[in-house]
Image (tube, grey):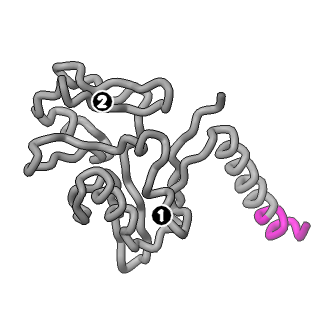
Amino acid sequence: MSKKIYVIDPERCTGCRLCEIVCSVKHMGISNPAKSAIHIIKWDQEGFYLPMHCQHCEDAPCMAICPKKAISRDEVLDRVVIDYDLCIGCKLCVSACPFGAMGYDPDSKRVFKCDLCDGDPQCVRFCDMKAVDYVETSHHSLQRMRESSERYSEVMRKHCGA
């Protein structure tokens, strides 16, 4: 069985932040982008928006630094998950994440991160622009090869008149 990966296409992101709202409502029961596990990083003047979330790193720094081994890899969905029965709320994982994808909710006094909505990411479901997607790894590789060949073809036409 092919695994799925979370894919971002910043060229499609309009910066609407619906993904943040959907995430916070699903996981925290409140419409509050600060409590979302996905964040839109905005460069308004350039019109560039980048959805950022947990990368579910193979060698996850949050998992490595956790003193209680409360963060582990779920092999079924190939994701990094938090066991709240073990988590002591030290926030070392928040500072260890190189993407800033681990959050801390001062109201619940819990760290949080993307959990891929147990295999059905709601941010993907509600993103009309498909700036975020959750696809089979083989499909993603094929799409990248196609995009690369199209760029190559454009370069060849431009420089060789082909």
Residue 142 position, x and y percent, is 73, 45
Residue 26 position, x and y percent, is 32, 54
Q: Residue furthest right?
A: 162
SS category of the residue bearing label 1: helix
Q: Quadrant of the C terminus?
A: bottom right
Q: For the magenta stretch, what is the residue range?
A: 154-162
Does the magenta portion include 105?
A: no
Residue 31 position, x and y percent, is 25, 65
Where on the picture, by quarter, is residue 64? top left
How crowded pointer 2 is (Cα within 10 Å; few <14, some 14-19, many 20+) is rated as: some
Q: How many marks?
A: 2
Q: Is residue 151 above or below residue 134?
A: below
Q: Are marks 1 and 2 in contact (CB under 8 Å)?
A: no
Alpha carbon distance from label 1 to label 2: 30 Å
Q: List the residue tagged with mark 1.
A: 126
Q: Is residue 116 above or below residue 157?
A: above
Mostly what secondary structure, the magenta segment? helix
Does the magenta portion include 155?
A: yes
How crowded pointer 1 is (Cα within 10 Å; few <14, some 14-19, many 20+) is rated as: some
Residue 153 position, x and y percent, is 81, 60
Q: List the residue tagged with mark 2.
A: 61
